[in-house]
């Protein structure tokens, strides 16, 4: 039989201080990128506006399209190649005009420019300001709702420390994913939101597996002379092969989506791809590590408390 | 010998049979979302307050008429805000008479009495306002449904969303601009007289009596495509509206070739009013107004009996046909605005399906091979279970009438990942039990038992987030949540029922088992 690990006993938890530094660096990198780029770039789903996907028969240049659209003065448009050289996405900001009017004008401008040749409008999306605001709120509610649900469930199934530590770990993953989006200048869209929520679920899964193992071990027998940190390290090691195998399969699935899923699924897959890595990492080095430090802090205070009582 | 083996086999066979029954034939049972099959998604906001305002206007008109009938002079009667009428009597002495008339009005409460000045305010009750707002959305929904039905779209979805929104999904529509025009038009048809005493120039300069307004006729030059707006001074009083229509048909315009017109026929009441109006106003001009645009204003030459009229105005045959549809379906009680629109062309939808399927098949194949290589026979069992998982997932989507969207496909990809994780958890546990020296059979037993709690925990947390997604998310996020939730339910079932059954069949029936292929 093929085995990745046979009774592994790596010292993960012992190196947690280094890992904290790594986590902080990555979180800071993400935050810096977000600040430098002036926050996330939101898709029209959240900002409101119009998106038109056009396929031309002859590949035009972005400049050509921009020139022909300039004639209708719909404001600062963003024009991007989408998938291949003939396909483009044009994003127009919100203007005080109905969606038909905007689409009609844009189509008119492109038709009027004979140098662009024939084209087909494949997709039109218009999101009004109200809906954009609704979706923004929805995104925040969904992420917060997901985190709160996880915290409650874990606090109930394990303990408060576990719940809080898991949520900190998941929150770290969310920040790192958002940072990765910002660094690669991708946009935050509805599919990206879905991916983020997936990662929240995925990341917490790993954490649950490790916690469950710890609890099971402690329930069976209280190991003599093994500190809480060592017990946690044992649990992480015992579940290591499962963690790695699952991460690998999910990682491969995400990779297939990323490279073969087409342009529409690309951002979704990208977040999944990054999230799987950080989710696996954060289980051990944030969720498990924080529980260890929190527990030893509480135990330390208890002991000091007892000493103080003994002295008096 | 494991327990209830036959019952369990029978149950699995039943599940498979039911799933296949729900899925057959595949093309018709799985609802594809608009992003996959192409079509229009429209979110309309109904301007409910305009309906309240127009009802208040009507009440004000009725009141004015009633007061005039009683010979009570009025200095001023105007709408204030959306739901209030300010009344000022010409003579405060008539106060008590006026109040008896007002009492008949109903649904309004009298406030801010100032008897000395003969002034009072009528405010529509909160309940009535709420009712009117609700009516506006319900009637709007009904009207739009009528129009869409007559337009001929297969499987449209038209539902109310929240307080004042209407969600419309039209799969496979080829001409979105036309569909939108058809749905979004208020289609308020009015017949009003031109104000013959006021000429256009002073009116444009601002010398306009309170009873009149300026409306325009749009004329498009067919060669240059440029639009001309011709002003008319129209009396505000409506003589007749589209509510009194019974028929609307397309006809060729006999006076200008290539143009079409819509012939309309009134109800008997409408015909009577139309006859009276034309009789009393011979020599004047009657404006036919649709949504505030004048279409024509012909001179009334004689009394028109029989209640027939035509609407002309440079229509193409499609425009005339659509106008006839909306006139037949009736006007929207209040105007609507497009809040959100997503139109996907059929070619893009087809591309998305193809790419989505490639991606999903690709990731499934990667996972299948990996499991087979790593876990051998047990991997094969997991792969079969994964197949069953997908079968159940699609069958449930078909049974619940859920819609498969592009993010939904992504949700399925994630489900595959989770289902595999479940099997890995179990298998790793079995291996561990073997390593500490358990016999194969008790290792299988312990492996399933010990992994159970973890698996339930992982599934419940993710299913919890999926519930949040599908209850609070809209459109694409919801589709993702739906397939994720169903997929995880199926995964829980297959792991504990089906995988276990296969293990029992493979190992537990024999008296002795030397090794497990895991």
Image (cartoon, coloured by chain):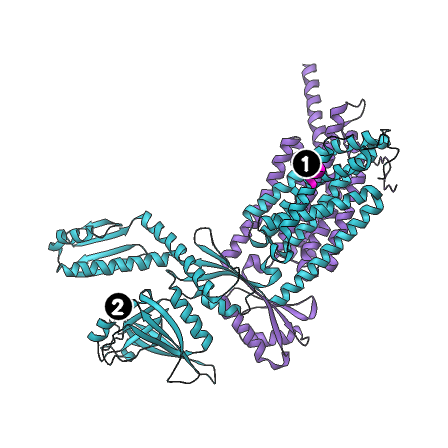
Colour given to chain B in the rendered image: cyan
Colour given to chain A in the rendered image: purple
Which segment did they paint magenta?
B7-12
Q: Is residue A15 visible?
A: no
Is residue B431 left or right of B266 when viewed as pictured? Answer: right
Chain assignment, label 2: B
Residue B209 occupies quadrant: bottom left
Is residue A295 left or right of A105 when viewed as pictured? Answer: right
- Badge 2 marks a residue whose secondary structure is loop
Vertical placement of A222 versus B320: above or below? above
Tell me the quarter of the image containing the N terminus of chain B: top right
Q: Are marks 2 and 1 in contact (CB under 8 Å)?
A: no
Q: Position of residue A288 (x, y in %)?
A: 73, 36
How many dots with numbers? 2
Chain assignment, label 1: B
**Of B407 and A49, which appears nearest the observer?**
B407
Tell me the quarter of the image containing the C terminus of chain B: top right
Is residue B266 left or right of B137 when viewed as pictured? Answer: left
Task: Name the residue located 30 percent from the left edge and 71 percent from the top edge.
Answer: B191
Residue B456's disc is 1
Task: Name the residue located 63 percent from the left edge and 42 percent from the top edge.
Answer: B463
Q: Position of residue B145 (x, y in %)?
A: 45, 60
Vertical placement of B34 versus A143: above or below? below
Q: Are marks 2 and 1 on the same chain?
A: yes
Residue B237's disc is 2
**Of B239 and B151, which appears nearest the observer?**
B151
């Amino acid at each position: 039989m093929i085995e990745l690990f046979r009774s592994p006993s790596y010292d993960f938890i012992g190196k947690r201080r280094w890992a904290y530094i790594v986590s902080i660096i990555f979180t800071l990198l993400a935050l810096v990128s977000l600040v430098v780029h002036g926050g996330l770039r939101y898709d029209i789903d959240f900002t409101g506006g119009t998106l038109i996907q056009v396929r031309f028969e002859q590949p035009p240049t972005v400049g050509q399209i921009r020139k022909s659209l300039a004639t209708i003065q719909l404001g600062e448009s963003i024009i991007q190649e989408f998938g291949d050289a003939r396909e483009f996405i044009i994003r127009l900001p919100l203007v005080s005009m109905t969606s038909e009017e905007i689409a009609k004008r844009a189509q008119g401008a492109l038709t009027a420019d004979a140098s662009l040749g024939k084209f087909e409008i494949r997709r039109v999306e218009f999101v009004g300001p109200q809906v954009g605001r609704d979706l923004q709120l929805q995104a925040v509610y969904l992420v917060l709702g997901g985190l709160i649900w996880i915290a409650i469930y874990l606090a109930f199934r394990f303990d408060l420390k576990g719940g809080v530590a898991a949520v900190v770990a998941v929150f770290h993953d969310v920040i790192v994913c958002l940072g990765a989006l910002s660094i690669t200048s991708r946009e935050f869209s509805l599919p990206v939101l879905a991916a983020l929520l997936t990662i929240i679920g995925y990341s917490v899964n790993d954490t649950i597996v490790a916690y469950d193992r710890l609890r099971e071990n402690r329930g069976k027998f209280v190991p003599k002379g093994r500190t809480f940190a060592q017990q946690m390290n044992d649990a992480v090691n015992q579940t290591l092969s499962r963690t790695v195998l699952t991460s690998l399969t999910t990682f491969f699935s995400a990779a297939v989506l990323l490279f073969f899923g087409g342009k529409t699924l690309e951002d979704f897959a990208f977040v999944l791809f990054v999230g799987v890595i950080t989710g696996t990492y954060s289980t051990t080095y944030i969720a498990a590590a924080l529980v260890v430090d929190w527990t030893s802090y509480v135990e330390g205070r208890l002991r000091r408390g007892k000493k103080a009582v003994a002295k008096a | 010998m494991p327990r209830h083996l036959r019952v369990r086999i029978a149950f699995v066979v039943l599940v498979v049979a039911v799933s296949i029954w729900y899925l057959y034939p595949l093309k018709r049972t799985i609802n594809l979302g608009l992003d996959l099959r192409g079509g229009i998604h429209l979110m309309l906001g109904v301007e409910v307050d305009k309906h309240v305002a127009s009802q208040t206007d009507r009440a004000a008109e009725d009141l004015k008429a009633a007061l005039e009938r009683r010979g009570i002079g009025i200095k001023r009667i105007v709408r204030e805000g959306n739901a209030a009428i300010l009344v000022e009597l010409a003579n405060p002495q008539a106060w008590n008479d006026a109040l008896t008339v007002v009492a008949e009005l109903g649904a309004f409460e009298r406030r801010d009495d100032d008897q000395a000045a003969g002034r009072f305010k009528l405010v529509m009750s909160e309940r009535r306002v709420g009712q009117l707002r609700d009516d506006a959305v319900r009637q709007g929904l009904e009207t739009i449904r009528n129009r869409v039905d007559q337009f001929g779209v297969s499987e449209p979805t038209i539902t109310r969303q929240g307080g004042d929104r209407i969600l419309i999904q039209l799969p496979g529509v080829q001409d979105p601009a036309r569909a939108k025009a058809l749905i979004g038009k208020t289609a308020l048809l009015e017949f009003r007289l031109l104000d013959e005493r006021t000429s256009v120039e002073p009116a444009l300069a601002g010398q306009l009596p309170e009873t009149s307004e300026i409306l325009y006729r749009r004329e498009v030059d067919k060669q240059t495509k440029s639009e001309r707006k011709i002003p008319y001074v129209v009396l505000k009083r409506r003589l007749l509206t589209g509510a009194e229509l019974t028929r609307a048909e397309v006809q060729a315009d006999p006076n200008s070739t290539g143009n079409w017109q819509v012939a309309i026929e009134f109800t008997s009441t409408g015909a009577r009013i139309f006859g009276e109006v034309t009789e009393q106003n011979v020599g004047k001009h009657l404006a036919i107004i649709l949504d505030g645009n004048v279409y024509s204003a012909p001179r009334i030459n004689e009394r028109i009996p029989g209640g027939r009229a035509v609407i002309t105005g440079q229509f193409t045959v499609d425009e005339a046909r659509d106008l006839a549809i909306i006139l037949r379906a009736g006007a929207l009680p209040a105007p609507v605005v497009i809040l959100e629109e997503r139109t996907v062309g059929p070619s893009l939808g087809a591309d998305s399906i193809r790419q989505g399927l490639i991606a999903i098949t690709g990731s499934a194949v990667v996972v299948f091979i990996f499991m087979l290589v790593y876990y051998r026979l047990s991997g094969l069992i997991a792969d079969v279970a994964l197949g069953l998982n997908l079968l159940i997932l699609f069958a449930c989507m078909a049974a619940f009438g859920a819609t498969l969207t592009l993010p939904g496909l992504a949700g399925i990809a994630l489900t595959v990942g989770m289902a595999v994780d479940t099997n890995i958890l179990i298998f790793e546990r079995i291996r561990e039990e073997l390593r500490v020296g358990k016999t194969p059979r008790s290792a299988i037993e312990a492996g399933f038992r010990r992994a159970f709690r973890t698996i339930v925990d992982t599934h419940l947390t993710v299913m919890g987030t999926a519930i949040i997604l599908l209850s609070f998310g809209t459109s694409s996020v919801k589709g993702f949540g739906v397939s994720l939730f169903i997929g995880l339910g199926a995964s829980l079932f297959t792991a504990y029922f089906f995988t276990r059954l296969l293990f029992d069949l493979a190992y537990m029936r024999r008296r002795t088992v030397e090794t497990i292929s895991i």
